[in-house]
Image: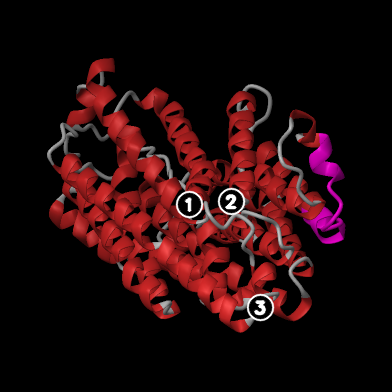
C-alpha cells in the first residue's frame, strides 16, 4: 500500500524544487521508485506468508491473520517515534535506517523458522512493519518536491503502479522459492496425512523459509548502504501553509476529514482482507500453490489503477470514482458470498481461453475486489484534505492512522471465519463498502 498524501503547500520551496529539471529529478525518482517497489513487495508478501504460516504453525484463520495485525499495527504504534527519528536524522539517513530495520526483521524469520514459534514470527512482522513506517513517512515528501508541482500527480501515479506491481510479483516469487518442490501442499492436504508425515512435511516447509529470507535481508542491507551514499539530496524543512480559514481552531472541526479517516480505516481493512485471505480460502479448498493467489488480487488492483489514470479527471471526477468503487465492492462482495467455491466458469470466461489456470468462482470474485478497491485510496486523500489549510499536515497524520484498519478488520474476519465459515465471513465487507459509499455521496461534502 502506498501512503501518498498530496502536499498543497505551494508557498514553501526547497533546494530540490529549485533545481527540478529532467536530469536533476531522474536519480531521485529512480531511488524513490525502488523504495516504493520495496513497499509493495514487503507488504503483499503477507498474502503468501499467511497461508504458509497457517500450515507451519498449525493455526486457525483468526490466529493466522494476527500476521496482518502485527504488521499494520506498527503503522499506528511507531508513527510518532519514527517521525521523531526523521526529525533528528534527516530524511535520507532515515530511509536507510528503515531498510536496515526491515532487514533485521527478515533475519528474525530464521530463528522463527527453526523453532516454528509463532510468537517470534509475529515479532519479526512488527519489526518489518516498523521499518516500513519510517520508509513511508520519509520517502513520500519526495514525490511532491522532487520535480515540478504541476506534475506531482503523475509521479504519484507512477509510484502507485510500482507499488501494486510489486504486490503481483512477491507472492509468485515466494511460492517459487519456498514451495517449488511442494506445489500441492495446503492446509487441506496436510490434514489428510498421518501425524508423522504431517510433522515431517512441516519441518521441510519451515526450513525452506530460511535461505530466501536471509537473501532478502542481505539485499536490503546492501540497498540501505547504497542509499546512504547515493546522490539523493536531503529535503529542507518548509514553512506551514498559512492560507486557511482562521476560524477553525481544531483539526477535529473538519467533519469531512474525520469521516475520511474512518473511510480509510474501512478501505484498508477490505483491501487487506481481499489480498491476504484469498490464499487462506484457497488453501482450505485444497488449491495448489495457494500462497500465490494474492497475485490475482494485486493484478486486478493494477488494472484498476491503470483505468483510473485513464479516466480521472478526463471522464469522471474523484467523487464519481469513489462512488463507483463502493458500488462495485458491494456487488462483488455479494457474489463472493453466494458463488460456487467449486465451479470455474467465471475464470474460464475471463482468462481460461488463453490457457491460464482456472480457479473457483469464489476465488475469482475475491480477486476482483482488488479492482473495486484500486481507486479508493487516491480518491479519499484529496477529498479529505480539501480546505484544511494549515491543518493539512495534521490531517495527513490522522489519515495515516486509518491504516490501522488493516490490523483490526482482518482479525474480525478471522473470528467470523472460524465461527461461520470462510465464505460467509465476507458478509462483513458489506458495511465497510456502505460506509465508503456514504462518504462518496455525503461525508466528503460536510463542512
Magenta segment: 333-349
Specify the color scheme: secondary structure
Residue at coordinates 71% horizontally, 45% vertically from top-left? 368
Mark 1 crowd level (few <14, some 14–19, many ≥20, 10 Å Cα): many
Q: Please indicate, yes or no, whether residue 382 appears anywhere in the rendered image.
A: no
Q: Residue at x 64, y 32 (%)?
A: 317
Task: Mark 1 and mark 3 in contact? Answer it, CB < 8 Å.
Answer: no
What is the spatial separation of the Cα atoms under label 3 and label 2, in whole angstroms? 24 Å
Badge 2 crowding class, 10 Å Cα cut-off, few under 14, some 14 to 19, many 20 or more, is many
- Would you place residue 153 above or below residue 300 in this image? above
Where is residue 215 drawn, in percent x and y? 31, 52
Give me the residue at 43% from left, 54% from top: 395
Secondary structure at badge 3 equals helix
Q: Return the residue at label 2.
A: 292
The secondary element bearing badge 1 is classed as helix
Residue 214 at x, y = what percent? 30, 57
Name the residue carrying label 3. Answer: 415
Residue, disc 1: 174
- 311, 345: nearer the viewer: 345
Q: Which of marks 1 and 2 is nearer the N terminus?
A: 1
Residue 224 versus residue 264: which sits nearer the camera?
Answer: 224
Q: Is there CB contact under 8 Å for labels 1 and 2? A: yes
Name the side, left or right, on which 29 lies relative to 358.
Answer: left
Q: Judge left or right: residue 101 versus residue 376.
A: left
Instruction: Indicate yes or no whether the magenta region holds residue 49.
Output: no
Amino acid at each position: 500500500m502506498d501512503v501518498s498524501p498530496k502536499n498543497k503547500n505551494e508557498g514553501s520551496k526547497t533546494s530540490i524544487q529549485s533545481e527540478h529539471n529532467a536530469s536533476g529529478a531522474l536519480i531521485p525518482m529512480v531511488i524513490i521508485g525502488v523504495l516504493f517497489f520495496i513497499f509493495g513487495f514487503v507488504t503483499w508478501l503477507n498474502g503468501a506468508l499467511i497461508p504458509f504460516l497457517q500450515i507451519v504453525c498449525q493455526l486457525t484463520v483468526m490466529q493466522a491473520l494476527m500476521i496482518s495485525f502485527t504488521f499494520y499495527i506498527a503503522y499506528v504504534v511507531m508513527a510518532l517515534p519514527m517521525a521523531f527519528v526523521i526529525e533528528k536524522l534527516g530524511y535520507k539517513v532515515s530511509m536507510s535506517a528503515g531498510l536496515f530495520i526491515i532487514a533485521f526483521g527478515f533475519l528474525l524469520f530464521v530463528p522463527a523458522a527453526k523453532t516454528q514459534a509463532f510468537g517470534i514470527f509475529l515479532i519479526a512482522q512488527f519489526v518489518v512493519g516498523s521499518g516500513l513506517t519510517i520508509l513511508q513517512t520519509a520517502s513520500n515528501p519526495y514525490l511532491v518536491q522532487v520535480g515540478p508541482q504541476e506534475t506531482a500527480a503523475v509521479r504519484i501515479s507512477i509510484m502507485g503502479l510500482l507499488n501494486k506491481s510489486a504486490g503481483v510479483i512477491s507472492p509468485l516469487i515466494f511460492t517459487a522459492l519456498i514451495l517449488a518442490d511442494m506445489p500441492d501442499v495446503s492446509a487441506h492436504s496436510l490434514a489428510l496425512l498421518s501425524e508423522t508425515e504431517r510433522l515431517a512435511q512441516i519441518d521441510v516447509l519451515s526450513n525452506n523459509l530460511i535461505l530466501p529470507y536471509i537473501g532478502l535481508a542481505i539485499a536490503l542491507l546492501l540497498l540501505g548502504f547504497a542509499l546512504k551514499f547515493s546522490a539523493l539530496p536531503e529535503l529542507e524543512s518548509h514553512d506551514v501553509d498559512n492560507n486557511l480559514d482562521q476560524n477553525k481552531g481544531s483539526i477535529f472541526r473538519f467533519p469531512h476529514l474525520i469521516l475520511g479517516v474512518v473511510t480509510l480505516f474501512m478501505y484498508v481493512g477490505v483491501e487487506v482482507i481481499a489480498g491476504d485471505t484469498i490464499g487462506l480460502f484457497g488453501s482450505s479448498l485444497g488449491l495448489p500453490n495457494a500462497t500465490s493467489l494474492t497475485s490475482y488480487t494485486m493484478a486486478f488492483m493494477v488494472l484498476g489503477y491503470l483505468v483510473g489514470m485513464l479516466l480521472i479527471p478526463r471522464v469522471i471526477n474523484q467523487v464519481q470514482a469513489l462512488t463507483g468503487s463502493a458500488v462495485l465492492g458491494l456487488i462483488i462482495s455479494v457474489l463472493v458470498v453466494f458463488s460456487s467455491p467449486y465451479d470455474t466458469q467465471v475464470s474460464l470466461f475471463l482468462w481460461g481461453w488463453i490457457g491460464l489456470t482456472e480457479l473457483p468462482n469464489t476465488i475469482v470474485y475475491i480477486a476482483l475486489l482488488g479492482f473495486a478497491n484500486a481507486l479508493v485510496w487516491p480518491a479519499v486523500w484529496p477529498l479529505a484534505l480539501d480546505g484544511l489549510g494549515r491543518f493539512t499536515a495534521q490531517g495527513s497524520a490522522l489519515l495515516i492512522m486509518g491504516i490501522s484498519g488493516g490490523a483490526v478488520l482482518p482479525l474480525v474476519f478471522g473470528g467470523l471465519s472460524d465461527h461461520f465459515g470462510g465464505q460467509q465471513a465476507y458478509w462483513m465487507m458489506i458495511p465497510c463498502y456502505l460506509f465508503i459509499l456514504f462518504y462518496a455521496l455525503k461525508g466528503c461534502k460536510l463542512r
